[in-house]
Image (cartoon, rainbow, N blue to C red):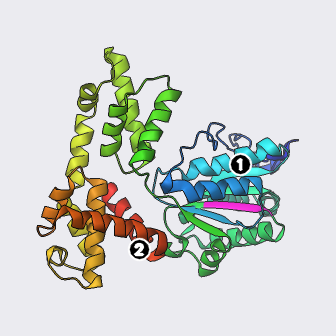
């Protein structure tokens, strides 16, 4: 049935089905945690500062005030890394803790298999006896009524017994279509934190950290060159670095700025095509139900000014154009107007939750092409 090993941390869902059915199943690893995903190996920055701090607090005080912890953000920004780090740190301090990390799709598959093999009670008992449940990509539950029903009861059981739940999603919980309102409500009981695409300095730090782990001396100008052009997410950033390192290894050439330009020329060309000021203006105008001409006009009503400032800030973040060039593209405005717009948006992202959400959504849309 549902096996539990001698060590509580090695509880394994659906490790095998009831013996009478003889259903073959590959034995999964104990808690499904990647030991290399730790808080030490996680490169922190302003974009993930709150999420990292919350995750560390949960690891130190599971079942406390941040329960459940809900982390959301785009693909490849470090949500999964933080979840593994929580599990690894908890096990380091309490090796007997019953910890499990899994993708929500795995939860659904386990439930289906348990139903097929008449083992639903074992399924329930297993999941409801965990001390820490780390469940990734919760949006996969959307539209799956039976899975939502079962997870609702699992969630309640764990919360009532003071056990910690950590979930991740690619969007704010209220925005998950096809998810029951009672689940959305419960997901917000604890703390909900966002991970944003990393800013330039964090991207550079990530590249330098990964290069150091690989024993590669990465020149600073190369790190900045890659970081300025790969902005969408950490996976693509690391992928670009791996390509440069592999090209250097295969050709025997040192990693210089010119070599990096050559190694990444097709990737850079693609990025340049995807993110243009024109594209930013069109995307922002469509998002706010405006016309591009509104953004370029002299109109100063807040309904126009804020989207215009948003578009300018995104242009500075996502393109390599100078401030005067950005200003010129917005109706011939001065570069000081662009500076003011960027500062204003940065301030409002801290104080205005809705505008902050708008910024993240637009940044994700534009970065993903």
Dot label at residue 355: 2
Q: Is residue 88 above or below residue 244?
A: below
Location of residue 27 (image quadrant): top right
Q: Is residue 88 left or right of residue 94?
A: left
Which residue is situated farthest in the bottom direction here?
301
Q: Is residue 240 left or right of residue 102?
A: left
Location of residue 258 (image quadrant): top left
Which residue is situated farthest in the top direction here?
252
Which residue is situated farthest in the front direction here?
336
Q: Is residue 15 above or below residue 294?
A: above
Please tell me which residue is depicted at 26% across the width and 25% down the height of the picture.
259
Disc 1 crowd rating (10 Å Cα; few below 14, some 14-19, many 20+) is many
Dot label at residue 87: 1
Number of numbered discs present? 2
Secondary structure mainly formed by the magenta segment: strand
Q: Is residue 333 left or right of residue 182?
A: left
Counting from the top left corner in percent of width and height, residue 219 is at 37, 28
- SS under mark 2: helix
Residue 45 included in the magenta stretch of the image:
no
Magenta range: 163-167
In space, the residues marked 1 and 2 are separated at their CA atoms by 33 Å
Give the mark nearer the N terminus: 1 vs 2: 1
Disc 2 crowd rating (10 Å Cα; few below 14, some 14-19, many 20+) is some
Counting from the top left corner in percent of width and height, residue 166 is at 67, 60
Counting from the top left corner in percent of width and height, residue 47 is at 48, 56
Dot label at residue 127: none
Q: Would you say residue 109 is visible in this rendering? A: no
């Amino acid at each position: 049935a549902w096996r539990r090993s001698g060590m509580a941390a090695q509880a394994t869902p659906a490790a095998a089905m009831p013996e009478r059915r003889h259903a073959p199943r590959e034995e999964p690893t104990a808690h499904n945690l990647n030991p290399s995903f730790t808080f030490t190996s996680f490169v922190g920055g302003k974009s993930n500062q709150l999420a990292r701090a919350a995750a560390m607090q949960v690891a130190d005080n599971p079942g406390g005030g941040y329960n459940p912890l809900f982390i959301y953000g785009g693909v490849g920004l470090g949500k999964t890394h933080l979840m593994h780090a929580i599990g690894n740190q908890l096990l380091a301090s309490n090796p007997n803790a019953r910890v499990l990390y899994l993708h929500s799709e795995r939860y659904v598959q386990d439930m289906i298999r348990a139903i097929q093999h008449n083992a639903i009670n074992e399924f329930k008992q297993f999941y409801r006896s965990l001390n820490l449940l780390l469940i990734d990509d919760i949006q996969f539950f959307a539209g799956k009524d039976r899975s939502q029903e079962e997870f609702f009861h699992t969630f309640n059981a764990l919360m009532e017994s003071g056990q910690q739940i950590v979930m991740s999603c690619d969007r704010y919980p209220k925005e998950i279509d096809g998810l029951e309102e009672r689940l959305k409500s419960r997901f917000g009981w604890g703390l909900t934190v966002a991970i944003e695409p990393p800013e330039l300095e964090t991207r550079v730090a990530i590249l330098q950290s990964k290069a150091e782990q690989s024993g590669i001396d990465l020149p600073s100008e190369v790190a900045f060159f890659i970081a300025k052009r790969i902005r969408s997410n950490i996976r693509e950033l690391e992928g670009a670095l791996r390509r440069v390192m592999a090209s250097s290894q295969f050709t025997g050439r040192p990693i210089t700025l010119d070599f990096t330009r050559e190694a990444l020329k097709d990737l850079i060309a693609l990025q340049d095509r995807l993110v243009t000021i024109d594209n930013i203006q069109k995307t922002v105008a469509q998002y706010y139900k405006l016309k591009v001409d509104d953004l370029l006009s002299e109109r100063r009503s807040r309904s126009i000014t804020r989207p215009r400032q948003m578009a300018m800030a995104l242009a500075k973040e996502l393109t390599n154009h100078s401030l005067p060039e950005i200003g010129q593209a917005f109706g011939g405005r001065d570069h000081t107007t662009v500076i003011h717009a960027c500062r204003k948006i940065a301030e409002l992202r801290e104080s205005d939750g809705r505008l902050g959400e708008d910024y993240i959504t637009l940044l994700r849309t534009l970065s993903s092409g």
